Amino acid sequence: MSQTQKMIALFVPLIFITFFFLFVRVMQYTPLHPSEEVVTAYNKKLANFTIPILSEDPILGDKKAKKTLVVFGDYGCAPCASLHNTFSILLEKHPKQFNVIWKGLTNNPDPFPKTDAHRLAYCANQQRKFIPFTQTAYALRGSFSSASLATLTKDIGLRKGRFNTCLESELPDNYMHQTAAVGRLLQIQQLPAIFYNDKQIQQPETIEEWEVILGLN
């Protein structure tokens, strides 16, 4: 066999294998930008999505109220703190007409720090102390020092042993993971994110605008 024939015999199988793998990769290729049909199907699915309300979710207002807002927020978010104050005013004026389901989204990466404000909020809510905790958390912009954490249980009337047991368990992290998963599905980009009848709405600027949107009288 000549040198040329040997080279051909060597490279032809290599060329065949190369084209074979290229063919496989083309068949496996997923475009970076999905087709219009895929986007439409996803948006339709999202439009029919009902935001899950978990038993652990804190509720502001009357649980039996017929109108419900779902709010995703963070204690380090100044607009979230302002919105909380607005809800306090609205609930004082209309205590039986609507309620707010709070879902906290942390900026901290997983695994979450033991002192993450949303972990603390979960355990405070287990003792029905979510509202006083939230007032403290917003005042501290969600950042608890060792000193503020040491006095927290006394300041808001928590049973310290039960609170610490909760913090050492997996329950807060599991709950935060569930909330984060819902946030990703809803493609939340900015906080606070407000949903009414499972649709995201723009935040009204005044108390009067809120009353119109919610039909409060």
Image (cartoon, grey):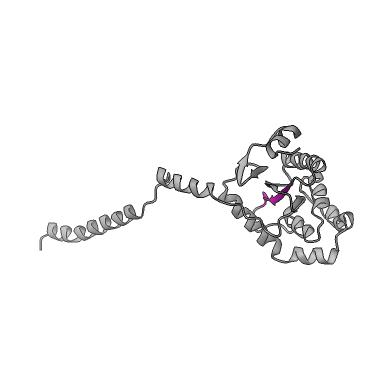
Q: Is residue 37 left or right of residue 58?
A: left
Which of 91/25 is in front? Answer: 91
Residue 205, percent from left and from top: 71, 32
How many numbered callouts?
A: 0
Note whether 76 is above or below 178 in the view shown. above
The answer to which image quadrant residue 119 occupies is bottom right
At 82% from the left edge and 47% from the top edge, which residue is drawn? 135
Q: Is residue 5 left or right of residue 141?
A: left
Which of 93/86 is in front? Answer: 93
Note whether 210 is above or below 2 in the view shown. above
Which of 85/74 is in front? Answer: 85
Residue 71, percent from left and from top: 68, 46
Q: Main secondary structure of the magenta part?
A: strand
- Whether residue 1 is visible here, answered yes or no, is yes
Pick out the residue farthest to the left: 1
- Whether residue 110 is visible here, answered yes or no, is no
Q: In the rendered view of the protein, which quadrant contains the C terminus?
A: top right
Q: Is residue 197 left or right of residue 65?
A: left
Q: In the rendered view of the protein, which quadrant contains the N terminus?
A: bottom left
The answer to which image quadrant residue 22 occupies is bottom left
Q: Is residue 94 left or right of residue 202?
A: right
Residue 47, percent from left and from top: 53, 46
Which of 131/211 is in front? Answer: 211
The range drawn in magenta is 99-108
Residue 214, percent from left and from top: 70, 40
- Is residue 32 inside the magenta stretch? no
- Is residue 100 inside the magenta stretch? yes
